Amino acid sequence: MLISLLTVALLSGAQTAKTLYDFTVEDIQGNQFALSELKGKKVLVVNTASKCGLTPQYEELEKLYNTYKDKNFIIVGFPANNFLKQEPGTNEEIAEFCQKNYGVTFPMMGKISVKGDDMHPLYKWLTSSTDSEVSWNFQKYMIDVNGNIAGYVSPKTKPFDEKIVEWIKK
C-alpha cells in the first residue's frame, strides 16, 4: 500500500515537473513539431474552433501575434472539436478557413482533444498543472520563457485583455 502511494506521488510529481518543451505535437500540415523549438519565447496556447461564437477571436489573436511576435512572443493554436462539435473540419479545411477568413500566420497545430478520455497529453499537463479544466473554445494558457505555465484565462477573455498584454510585456 505504501509503495503504491509513493509510486502515485512520484508519478504525479513527474507530470507537474514537465515543461512545455517536453512535448512534441503534430502541426496542421501533419509534421512533427517539437515545442522545445519555442525556448526563450512567451507562448500563448489556445484551443480553437471555426464554428463558435468566439471564432472572431482569431482576428484579435492574429493582431496580438503581429504586435508582439518580435518581442519573443508566439501564439500556438490547437483546433479541438470538444464543444458542441464546433470544429468538425479536417486539418486542411481548418488551415484554409483560418487563412481565408482571418489571415492567421501564427502556428496552428493539428486537431486534438482538449478534454475527456482522449485528452491530448499537452492538455493533461496544462489542466493538471493549473488545476483547471478547459471550459470552452479559446481558453488561453500563458507559458513563460522557460516553458512553465504562468497562468490562464477564460475563453471569453479577449486577446488584448490587460492580463495577457501585461504578461507579454513583463
Image: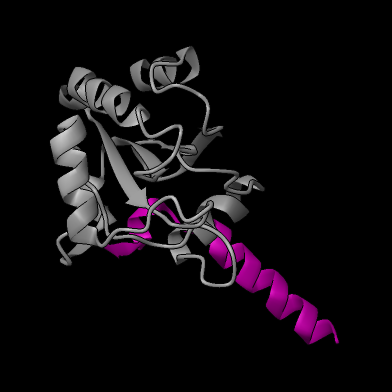
Q: Start and end of the magenta stretch? A: 1-27
Q: Can the viewer see residue 104?
A: no
Nearest the eye: 35 or 91: 91
Q: Residue at x 55, y 64 (%)?
A: 15
Q: Residue furthest right?
A: 1
Q: Quadrant of residue 93?
A: bottom left
- Indicate yes or no whether the magenta region holds residue 17: yes
Q: Can the viewer see residue 66?
A: yes
Q: Is residue 73 left or right of residue 168?
A: left
Q: Residue at x 15, y 48 (%)?
A: 96
> Residue 54, relative to residue 97: is it above or below?
above
Identify the image's colour scheme: rainbow, by chain, secondary structure or one colour. one colour
**Residue 127: image x %, image y %?**
58, 52
- Indicate yes or no whether the magenta region holds residue 106: no
Quarter of the rendering occupied by the N terminus: bottom right
**Residue 84: image x %, image y %?**
53, 52
